[in-house]
Image (cartoon, grey):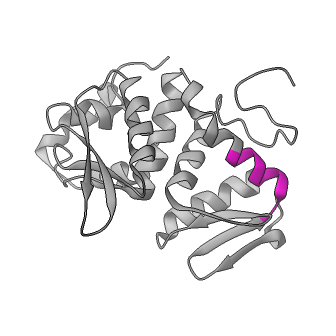
Amino acid sequence: MGNTVGSTSANLCNFFEDPKDAYILGLWCADSYWWSSSIGLSNTNKELIARFKSFLLGKGFPEARIRYNRDHLFVNSRPLLREFIAAKKMLGRVKKRKIISAYLAGRFDGDGCINQDLRKDCRIVYGTRAEAEFDQKLVRKLGIIQTKVYYYRTSSTFCLYVSRYITKEFTKRIFSHSSKLQKLALVPRRDLGSYKGKNLHGSKLS
């Protein structure tokens, strides 16, 4: 099994090599649902629920094992839960930009928002300052420095804001993974020209 980042005894996921798994990790970190030996997603967005379900099916969990309760989709699997928890703790060691971008796309789809022009008000919401500042460090690994963490007393939440001067670079990094950004880009607007054709996802990630 080797000593790769994120290796576990179960070895069900490849969070630090496969961008699709990294996205799911980010989505779970944003909207995690877990209890005892169960792990899943808590979200009212049916598209994101379906994406998490597809992930579970792809990992070999049969349809009959996947449960849905109101806004919670989950599966009983202690090994899978251990992998997610271990991977979350080891995120700080990730260096590959394509993995960081995919993870942040999951975080953004779960708890992020942006103005419809895709140029301003780009932010991700967190429950603790530690989580917000942790992701701020990951964003810096993408070369994106102009960010700030704000605390909102009325909602007791923290927001990681991306400066409007560099929002375009951030969205390019996560666009190919983000369902939310791709849906916004379907709305006809003249200012989305830079997201079309060969320049859709920005520079090549390593």
Q: Position of residue 191 (x, y in %)?
A: 13, 41
Secondary structure mostly taken by the magenta-highlighted segment of the chain:
helix
Residue at x 23%, y 34% (from the top left corner): 168
Q: Find the magenta span and give its range.
A: 76-85
| The image quarter in which residue 22 lies | top right
Number of numbered tags placed on the structure image: 0
Tell which of 49 and 200 is nearer to you: 49
| Residue 181 against residue 164 in the figure, above or below | below
Residue at image position (65%, 28%) is 17
Where does residue 103 sit, x and y in percent of width and height? 51, 40
Q: Quadrant of the N terminus?
A: top right
Q: Position of residue 151 (x, y in %)?
A: 26, 54
Residue displayed at 32% across by 33% down: 172
Q: Residue furthest bottom?
A: 70
- Residue 128 is situated, as x and y percent measured from the top left of the image, at 42, 53
Instruction: Left or right? Give the position of 43 relative to 17.
Output: left
Q: Is residue 34 visible?
A: yes
Residue 196 is left or right of residue 104, and the answer is: left
Q: Would you place residue 135 above or below residue 157 in this image?
A: above
* Residue 178, visible in the rendered structure: no
Q: In the depicted view, which residue is nearer to us: 186 or 99?
A: 99
- Give 7 or 12, whichever is nearer the viewer: 7
Q: Quadrant of residue 89?
A: top right
The answer to which quarter of the image holds residue 158 is: bottom left
Q: Residue at x 33, y 20 (%)?
A: 143
Q: Is residue 102 magenta?
A: no
